[in-house]
Image (cartoon, grey):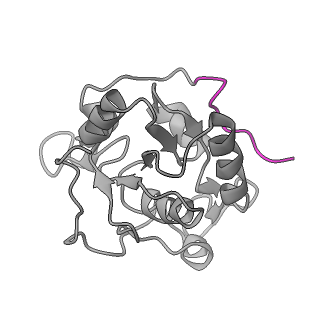
Amino acid sequence: MKSSLVPMATVIGITMALGATPSIADEVEAYRETTLGLYATAIEAHNLMQDNDRAVLIDVRDPIEIKFTGFAEPTDIHVPWVLAERDNFDEEAKTWPMVKNADFEEQVRAKIDALGVNKEDPIIVMCRSGATRSAPAADVIAEMGYSEVYSMTDGFEGEKLKEGNSQGVRAQDGWRNSGLPWSYDINPDVAWRPAH
């Protein structure tokens, strides 16, 4: 295992959820630390995948988010942790609420089983910024018996710029901003489809 993959014991716990409305706080507790304490930046995750062909990358972002921000090309599994509830616009928050994907565990288990992932294989979980979805999703996968589940700390888009003309734009670190392979094209074999 690469020595640069270091547990982040100092990471602050609860952070703001993606476009959070009160419903996500009620539906899903969002946090950053994982029970296994395994973390990787996008670059470390990519290196791990280059060094170990058994490593699996799971994207847990909403499909619409991926449509407009892009997709990491080596993604093996796409199952959203939360989904925009498009039929229930929140007038007060001025957005659609995010609700937990009730089928997350079942869908991830089916995809992992289909790929023949072993309990000891590295699994890397990625959301937008590593702030609120990859950690709880990683914990669910760890509870399924997988022993090497990483939360990607800077996610696909990374951190927001703190100053300059593009202040507030997610353009620092993360998969997309680190020169790693990504595209707006989504692999049809990996794209999430809702349970029927």
Residue 180, image x and y in percent? 30, 26
| Residues in magenta, as a range | 187-196
Left or right of 62 in this view: 53: left
* Residue 85, quarter of picture: bottom right
Residue 184, image x and y in percent? 49, 23
Residue 60, image x and y in percent? 53, 48
User: Relative to 33, is 57 above or below?
Assistant: above
Please tell me whether residue 195 belongs to the stretch shown in magenta: yes
User: Relative to 104, is 183 above or below?
Assistant: above
Left or right of 15 in this view: 114: right
Q: In this figure, what is the number of numbered marks?
A: 0
What is the magenta segment's predominant secondary structure? Answer: loop
* Residue 48, quarter of picture: top left
Please tell me whether residue 194 belongs to the stretch shown in magenta: yes
User: Relative to 127, is 143 above or below?
Assistant: below
Residue extending farthest to the bottom is 26
Write the residue at 46% across / 70% down: 30
Foreground: 30 or 78? 78
Foreground: 166 or 16? 16
Specify the quadrant that holds the N terminus: top left
* Residue 81, quarter of picture: bottom right
Left or right of 84 in this view: 67: left
Write the residue at 23% across / 50% down: 5
User: Relative to 175, is 162 above or below?
Assistant: below
Write the residue at 30% across / 30% down: 51
Residue 14 seen in render: yes
Residue 160, image x and y in percent? 25, 49
Residue extending farthest to the right is 196
